[in-house]
Image (spheres, rainbow, N blue to C red):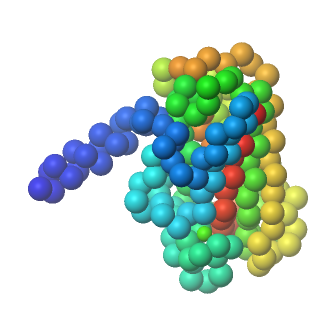
Amino acid sequence: MKKILAFAIASAIISGCSNSGNNSNPATQPQPNKLEITNDMETASTMIPSWQNEKTVIAAKELAAHSGKFVCATNDTAEFGYTYCELLKNITSFIPKKVTVNGWVYTTVANPKFSIILDVSENGKLYDWKTFPLDSLNETGKWVEFDASFYLDKPLNPEQSVKVYPWNQSKKPVFIDDLKITFE
Ligand SMILES: [Ca+2]
């Protein structure tokens, strides 16, 4: 049984972004040329399709979560946080020109070396990589809303995969909650 479970987990990891997509995800609200994907971290342990690195989502103890009980915790041992990863063809029926990541961040250190990353890959090879630094955060110990906008200037195709994740290089705890990713 353990072996079967291990195989299932390994398969899930290897399959990467090629799962069935999020169009059945109740959090998505399809509109023409605009798609919003939300995640409040409360059900990450159910392995929501298109989301990875669930191990960084924890029940908040030393702080109150922005919503519910769960947040994504990044720190010296978890440099990369909860990650959205999906093939473009499974996300939208259109080619997006812009991706906006809205959410709430809680830093324990002023001006953390912390950013939101968007990368695009094709057949496992990195095609485009963009960073939106949130290092101007100078208020510690409170939830602050952020908007990270990415303009996709390189031509995209539906077979490419899009990945969105937080990257904490500060070695100090920085938390994220209530993400909204908008493709348009
Ligand atoms: Ca939450």
Residue 29 visible = yes
Q: Give me the residue at 69% from left, 52% from top.
A: 180
Residue 131 visible = no
The image position of residue 58, as x and y in percent, is 51, 70
Q: Which quadrant, please, contains the N terminus?
A: bottom left
Q: In the rendered view, tell whether residue 170 sits above or below residue 147.
A: below
Q: Which residue is more in the foreground, 66 or 82?
A: 66
Q: In the rendered view, tell whether residue 108 sits above or below residue 134.
A: below
Q: Picture quarter containing residue 32?
A: top right
Asked if residue 27 lies left or right of residue 140, the reply is left
The image position of residue 46, as x and y in percent, is 40, 59
The image position of residue 115, as x and y in percent, is 73, 50
Q: Give me the residue at 73% from left, 70% from top.
A: 106
Q: Give me the residue at 54% from left, 59% from top.
A: 78
Q: Which quadrant, please, contains the C terminus?
A: top right
Q: In the rendered view, tell whether residue 141 sits above or below residue 38.
A: below
**Ligand 1 is located in which of the four quadrants?**
bottom right
The image position of residue 155, as x and y in percent, is 71, 16
Asked if residue 172 lies left or right of residue 18, the reply is right
Q: Give me the residue at 48% from left, 60% from top.
A: 44
Q: In the rendered view, tell whether residue 179 sits above or below residue 8.
A: below
